[in-house]
Image (tube, grey):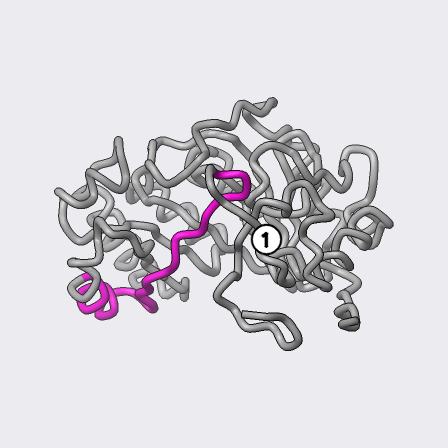
Amino acid sequence: MNKPIRLPRQPRYIQIETVTGCDAKCPFCPQRKINRQPAVMPDRIWKKIIDDTRGLGITYRPFLQNEALMDKRLSEIIGYIRQDPTSRVEINTNGHQLDEERAGRLIEAGIDVIRFSIDAFSEKTYAKCRIGLDYRRVVDNIKNFIRIASRDHRHVTVEVRMIDMETNRHEQHDFIEYWSQRADRALIVPLYNWPWDKGVEAVQKPCIKMREEMFFYSNGQAVLCCWDIAGRAVIGDVTKENVLDIWNGDVRRRLAEYLSRGERKRIPLCSRCDAYKERHFEGFDD
């Protein structure tokens, strides 16, 4: 039997679903199926998550399965996090709502990393990948963000991403060449199958997604994985418990032990998930 992985006593990353909405309807994303309430996380909940973990060197990500810029409080949230000098803040965004005013506020608040998901290098392809958004507006917003950060002498790591899909493979070379000259990083990233998507079956391998990361819904529930859109693996509730008590609690540790041994079938959420199927884990069949 494989020895269980030694689990860390605190999370390294915490993701917080401060709102549930998104301004795009992308064909590969199940976000539109989410009808969780409340649509906006109350201030007392996100502040408690942060207060419970101050001074621990946490990287906070104030988004989950939503578009981060849908929350008009985002710069306030980032500023609250950065009151802790050991903290870092990262967001992923489609960039559509990042006008110059908002860009300036996020930079001033102290954002450390921003990842833009574009998924195309032409308007035609973008219209197939990011439905409801304007390609030219997004590109201009990203370039303006980079310019403002440079003007204000603030170092913000800017990453531009393209999800690998059949619809955009003919543009990937040009995408990397263009954005690698403007952003800190330009990447092609894999398209994950969401758990419980049609035809998805689990691989019996460990999962690294939950090893150092913690995830919170807008109602304060903690879930095992960011890909849990339906609450199949709730591990606690921060409105009733301390963040670290949830992290080190019996429920999460039991599930984490299962996953360290590749026993995904023992967890309903993970029983139909093939994440990391291409990754090699010593002692597990590829």
10 Å neighbourhood of mark 1: few (<14), some, or many (≥20)? Answer: many
Q: Quadrant of the C terminus?
A: bottom right
Of 153 and 34, nearer the camera is: 34
Left or right side of 223 for 280: left
Q: Residue at x 76, y 51 (%)?
A: 255
List x then y, in percent, for residue 184. Answer: 33, 68
Q: In this picture, is 35 found above or below 211?
A: above
Left or right side of 95 for 2: right
Residue indicated by mark 1: 60
List x then y, in percent, for residue 91. Answer: 47, 51
Residue 57: within the magenta? no
Give the magenta part as a residue range.
175-197
List x then y, in percent, for residue 94. Answer: 34, 44
Q: Residue at x 21, y 49 (%)?
A: 167
Picture quadrant of residue 175? bottom left
Residue 181: within the magenta? yes
For mark 1, give the secondary structure: strand
Left or right side of 178 for 240: right
Q: In this picture, is 223 found above or below 231?
A: below
Of 262 and 190, nearer the camera is: 262
Q: Quadrant of the N terminus?
A: bottom right
Q: Residue at x 33, y 42 (%)?
A: 98
Q: In this picture, is 211 found above or below 252?
A: below
Picture quadrant of residue 284? bottom right
Residue type, label 1: Tyr
List x then y, in percent, for residue 6. Answer: 78, 70
Q: Residue at x 60, y 23 (%)?
A: 38
**Count of numbered marks:** 1
